[in-house]
Image (cartoon, rainbow, N blue to C red):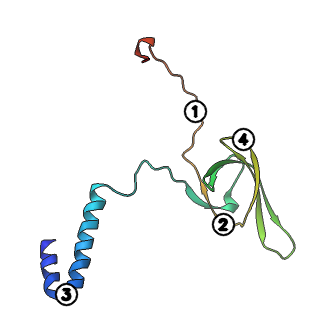
Amino acid sequence: MKKGVQLAKRLSPSLSTILNLNASTHSLLSSSPWWSASQHRGVKVNAIHLRPGNVIEKSGRVYQIVESEHKQRGRGGALMQVELRDVDNGNKVSLRFGPEEPVESLRHLTNCKYHWTYSASLLLT
C-alpha cells in the first residue's frame, strides 16, 4: 500500500487523499466490522408469499400471521389482506400489502421448550 500512496503523491494531492481514506477505511473494516454475523436479520419476501404461521417484522414489531387473503376488486390492483398478532402483547392488527411489496420475514425464530437444571449452591445473593 505504501507504493500506491507514494505514487499518488506524485500524481495529485486529491488522489493521495482518496487512497489514504481507502487505506484507513480498510483497516477499520478489517479490525472491527460494522456488521456482525450474530445479527438476526430476516429475509425480504414479497407479500404474496405470506402464509398463516409465518413471523414477520414490521415497524420494529414482531408479528405472527394469523390469516392471509389475496383480494382484487374489479379493475383495481390486487392487495394482500393480512391479519397479524403481535408476539409481545398479543394484540391483533389488520394490514394491507401490495403483492410485490417487500416484507421482512423472520425465519430464525424457533419455538422450543427448555428445562433448566442448576444447583442451589450456585445461586448468588
Q: CA distance from mark 1 to mark 3?
A: 61 Å
Badge 4 is on which residue? 90
Q: Amino acid at mark 4?
A: Gly
State which tag comes first along the sequence, 1 or 4: 4
Q: Amino acid at mark 1?
A: Cys
Q: Nearer the viewer, mark 3 or mark 2?
A: 3
State which tag comes first along the sequence, 4 or 3: 3
State which tag comes first along the sequence, 2 or 4: 4
Q: Picture coordinates of residue 69 (x, y %)?
A: 79, 57
Badge 2 is on which residue? 101
Q: Picture coordinates of residue 91 (x, y %)?
A: 74, 44
State which tag comes first along the sequence, 3 or 2: 3
* Numbered mark located on residue 125 in the image: none
Q: Is residue 9 visible?
A: yes
Dot 3 falls on a residue whose secondary structure is: loop
Q: Residue at x 27, y 56 (%)?
A: 31
Q: CA distance from mark 2 to mark 4?
A: 25 Å
